[in-house]
Image (cartoon, rainbow, N blue to C red):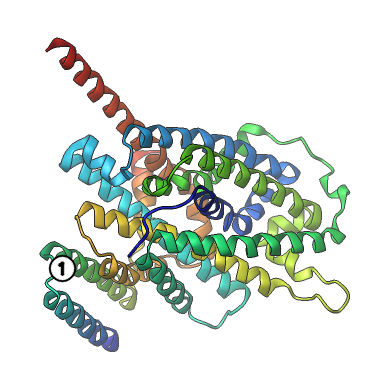
Amino acid sequence: MIWFIFMFIIMLGGILTIMIRSRTAAREIVLVTSLLLLGFADWISIFMNHKFKSSKIIAILIDWVGL
Amino acid sequence: MENNSMTVWQFFVLTLSFLAGTSFFFLPGGLIAVAKQDAWMVPLWAGAAGVMAALIWLKLARQHPGLSIIQICTKVAGKPIGGLFAIMYISYFIQLSVFITRNVGDFMKQTLMPITPLTMFHVMLLVISAYAVVKGIDTIARSSELLFIIMAITFVLIFCMALVAWDWSRFQGSFRMNVWETLKETRYIFGFPFLEALVFLMLFPFVQSKVKRSFILAIVVATLLLSVTTFFTIGVLGVPRASHDTYPLFVIAQEVHVGTFFEHLESTIALILLAAIFIKLSIAYYCSVLGLCQLFRISSRLWVTLALILLISGLSLGYDNVVENIEFSQRYDFEYTLLYSVFIPCLLLFVTWIRKKVKRREGTAS
């Protein structure tokens, strides 16, 4: 997990540097960072043995609606 | 420079590969387990429902020419509610990519490489698809055009070779199914693959002409192919064997041998499945990226595509095993897809109709 966090920080830093240097629009930087952080959170949940199950949430919602 | 258009043939091949490509492998076993000897009829009514849903999507697309479903949502329902619908569609495309990615992982781990970690399959396929997505829809369409011919020839060859094991007596006991029960238990076939074709609402603006004809024709051909494959699986493997295998077509390929020269064709069929999954994943992935780019008005797809690899590969590990994946598909896939493929498009059509009527009335009043 330590290696994953380390690699992620390097990757995020690299991507942000390239995007800022190439004068990318702010909303693109925010969107990419949000997606990366979401992915990072998901992977951390896997490493912590508390997997985020998107299918389970969909199933709960469908059951809740009563379909 | 990207060429943002597709020919009618490319669109037809893309639709057919999307619909038939992976369902060949994943559907027949489950259908035969429920409907026994009559399982070949199930794709026919599901295909008919698919054509009806396609007519709704085409009507919606015709009301808003040149716009994708994301743009239609924001145009028709306004920024707050339309934006919410658009985010829901993007999440659906991402979830579809997750589902497809997981399918390839399960298949490879179960059949060919049991020791390799799932993530390896997921990340490798996602990187290739991401490259295709960055290159654009034209590249995906051209590669599917090439792969489609190879896939079709291999399928026909394997079918011909497997016909040696054909036995008509395996159809004894046909036409005895309870239609309503079968319809209820096999309802997931409406969702996977027919209603999933709603992703093409993102791609209609790229097609130069004859969208309706090629789209409907692709659905009809996919329906017939799926029905023929199920019929073929029953005739070659029989109901008891086919219903106990997760991938019956793979078992058929495993048992094909002509003399001692043509043997173990299962790796060939695995390659065909990988090609089919590549096309399907590329389309779903492209739609997610394009949706995000259109919603947030971003011109470059590169960074969004790369960022999504991390998210999709993580989410695809959200299933504990293949059984959980199949159970979700059988229990919830239809209901989940129905919302995006029928409810929201009908709602958007209704709002468009009301808006047009109000505008016409205002025009006549002034």
Is residue B122 at all visible to an observer of this figure?
A: yes
Image x and y of residue B323, in percent: 54, 62
Q: What residue type is labelled 1?
A: Ile
**Visible in this render: residue B246?**
no
The answer to which of B134 and B106 lies nearer the viewer is: B134
| Nearer the observer, A1 or B310 | B310
**Image side of residue B235 versus residue B296, left or right:** right
Which image quarter: residue B345?
A: top left
Badge 1: few (under 14), some or many (20 or more) residues near its Cα, within 10 Å? some
Which chain is indicated by disc 1? A
Q: In this view, does A40 lie to the left or right of B149?
A: left
Total number of numbered discs in the rendering: 1
Q: Position of residue B360 (x, y in %)?
A: 22, 17
Report the residue at 48% width, 80% height from top: B117
Q: Is mark 1 on a helix, strand or loop?
A: helix
Viewer-proximal residue, B28 or B220?
Answer: B220
Q: In the image, is residue B145 above or below residue B185?
A: below
Quadrant the C terminus of chain B occupies: top left
Q: Which residue is drawn at 14% across and 10% down?
A: B365
Place of residue B304 in the rendered image (x, y in percent of width and height, measured from the top left): 27, 66
Residue at image location 44% in from the left, 52% down from the top: B6
What is the quadrant of the N terminus of chain B in the image? bottom left
Q: Which residue is drawn at 78% across and 58% down?
A: B237
- Please tell me in which quadrant of the rendered image residue B318 appears: bottom left
* Residue A41 falls left or right of residue B317: left
Q: Mark 1 points at which residue?
A: A29
Return the x and y of residue B83 as percentages of the image width and height.
21, 45
